[in-house]
Image (cartoon, rainbow, N blue to C red):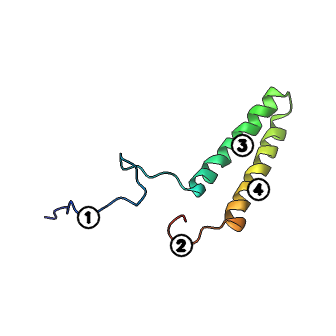
Amino acid sequence: MSVRDPSSDDLRSGAGPAGLVSPSKYDLLLAAVPALLLGGTVAAARLALPVSVGTGLGSVFAALLVGYGLFVEPPVGGHDA
């Protein structure tokens, strides 16, 4: 039977009082992709444009954001610096 050593820290550094880790910039980039797609769709509906136009514009901005995350600020190493 294994026993957990209470002196070992199982949490990453930077964890808050509840043991939650704040999201990295890459987590936020990934969360922004569907938000941009949804925002484009909603904007098209509000502006009486075809939904395909709004979704297309949202996808262009989402693709630019993914490209930024991959090529301008690429993830290096195991931790977000």
Q: Secondary structure at mark 1?
A: loop
Q: CA distance from mark 2 to mark 1?
A: 23 Å
Amino acid residing under circle 2: Gly
Label 3 or label 1, whichever comes before in sequence order: 1
Circle 4 is placed at which residue position?
Answer: 64
Considering only vertical position in the picture, is 12 above or below 58?
below
Q: Residue furthest right?
A: 49
Label 2, label 4: how many angstroms apart (C-alpha)?
23 Å
Q: Earlier in the sequence, mark 2 or mark 4?
A: 4
Where residue 79 appears, as percent x and y from the top left, is: 50, 66
Q: Nearer the viewer, residue 6 or 66?
A: 6
Q: Nearer the viewer, residue 32 or 1?
A: 32
Q: Position of residue 51 (x, y in %)?
A: 80, 35
How far across and down, in percent of the image, does residue 71 sit?
71, 67
Determine which residue is flagged by label 3. 37
Please state if 22 lies on the left or on the right of 64 as rendered.
Answer: left
Q: Quadrant of residue 8?
A: bottom left
**How far apart in space, not on screen, are marks 1 and 4 (Cα)?**
42 Å
Q: Earlier in the sequence, mark 3 or mark 4?
A: 3
Query: Mark 1 Cα within 10 Å, few/some/many (few <14, many 20+)?
Result: few
Q: Is residue 24 left or right of residue 50?
A: left
Q: Identify the residue position indicated by label 2 in the image.
A: 77
Q: Which mark is residue 8?
A: 1
Distance from disc 3 to disc 4, alpha carbons, whole Å, reads 12 Å
In the image: residue 54, left or right of residue 79: right
Mark 2, residues whose alpha carbon is within 10 Å: few (<14), some, or many (≥20)? Answer: few
At x 78% / y 33%, what residue is drawn?
43
